[in-house]
Image (tube, rainbow, N blue to C red):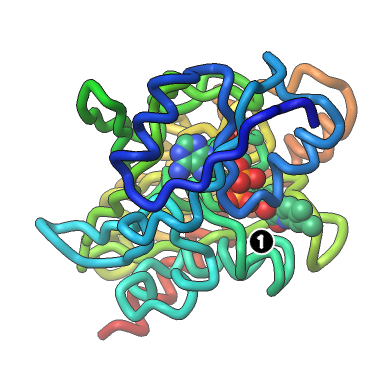
Amino acid sequence: MTAQTFYNPASIAELLDVLDKFKEKVVIVNGGTDVVERLQTGRVAPPPDAIMYIRNVAELDYIREENGHVAVGGITSYAEMLSSPLCRQFGGLMQALAEIGSPPIRTIATPAGNIGTAAPAADCNAALMALGASVVLASKTGERALSFEELFSGPQKTCLRRDELIREIRIPVNKTATSAFIKLAKRKAQDIAQVSACVCLEAEGDVCKNVVVSLGAVAPVTVRARSMEALIVNKTVDDAVAAVRGFVPSEASLRSPRNKAYKEAVIGVIVGRAIKKAHAETAGRK
Ligand SMILES: Cc1cc2nc3c(=O)[nH]c(=O)nc-3n(C[C@H](O)[C@H](O)[C@H](O)COP(=O)(O)OP(=O)(O)OC[C@H]3O[C@@H](n4cnc5c(N)ncnc54)[C@H](O)[C@@H]3O)c2cc1C
């Protein structure tokens, strides 16, 4: 670690002042589960002049429902979300969070950090994309919102400016939709996804009416698989599951030969499982 200055702001205003002053030369530490190791091994570019620990900004720690969405603050942890009655309505999100790391990791790590790291296999990002979530970014010059489809520009790259804070994640409330997340990994815990999928489904009886499919670990960024959604809409659940089996969506871009055949073979299988699981939840709500 080379940074000379450590900041520990207590308010959003103070935090934004530091971001504005240092821009790309300050690194935000939230839960620290990704970035501390990168700092320790000198893998943060450019080398920072300052480190800013943001976990004492109490204004950023909340989960509340307002204006048709559930709002999650920029330092809220996975554990807080997992125990929140407001988040429980998002089945796919709960399933994704329960598969992240282990209880100690989930206690300190955050969805804001998952966005900041922008790993192609990030579990929370895949779930939030399928749920149509957006992110509110704040800087000294104001705020803007980006959808999850707009957020990522490459592996470990986001469209955030270096003076911007992930202030809030907004998850739209949709009482007619259900969702499910499936992750394939080599181990049950403490492992990143080989492939992951989240499906958000609105069904009428057995027929899939609206669907969003997101995929992790099949492209340089988390992707929305619109080509797969087109195969699912207006089909019965069984027909949709049959249609996606063996289908390789155009949004998957697996350039490396490592695991390519395996990944292509399992995408349709796990999307099919997620469709069934989301639909079963629809039935359970009646
Ligand atoms: C043992 C272990 C197991 C793991 N398992 C999984 C797993 O199963 N699935 C998975 O997806 N990930 C996993 N991870 C990765 C990691 O835990 C997640 O990506 C987590 O969401 C990171 O959150 P954090 O708060 O610790 O982020 P940090 O490490 O604090 O930050 C990550 C990045 O985001 C930026 N950042 C953080 N918060 C903000 C903010 N509010 N505004 C602007 N930028 C911000 C930081 O500057 C940094 O660049 C694992 C990590 C470990 C160590």
- As helix, strand or loop, the secondary structure at mark 1 comes to loop
Pointer 1: what residue?
Answer: 100
Residue at the left extreme of this rendering? 67
State yes or no: Cβ of the residue under disc 1 lies below 8 Å from any atom of ligand 1. Answer: yes
The percent position of residue 60, horizontal first and vertical second, equals 35, 55
Badge 1: residue crowd in 10 Å (few <14, some 14–19, many ≥20): many
The percent position of residue 101, horizontal first and vertical second, equals 72, 62
Q: Report whether 12 appears left or right of 50.
A: left
Q: In the image, what residue occupies the spot 24% across and 67% down?
A: 64
Residue 175 visible in the picture = yes
Along the viewing direction, whichever of 125 and 240 lies nearer the viewer: 125
Quarter residue 161 falls in: top left
Q: Report whether 238 appears left or right of 122.
A: left
The percent position of residue 269, horizontal first and vertical second, equals 66, 52
Quarter residue 15 falls in: top left
Residue type, numbered disc 1: Ile
Along the viewing direction, whichever of 260 and 70 lies nearer the viewer: 70
Q: In the image, what residue occupies the spot 31% across and 57% down?
A: 59
The percent position of residue 229, horizontal first and vertical second, equals 41, 39
Q: In the image, what residue occupies the spot 56% across and 46% down?
A: 53
Along the viewing direction, whichever of 75 and 211 lies nearer the viewer: 75
Residue 125 visible in the picture = no
Quarter residue 100 falls in: bottom right
Q: In the image, what residue occupies the spot 30% across and 33% down?
A: 138
Identify whether 63 is placed above or below 235.
below
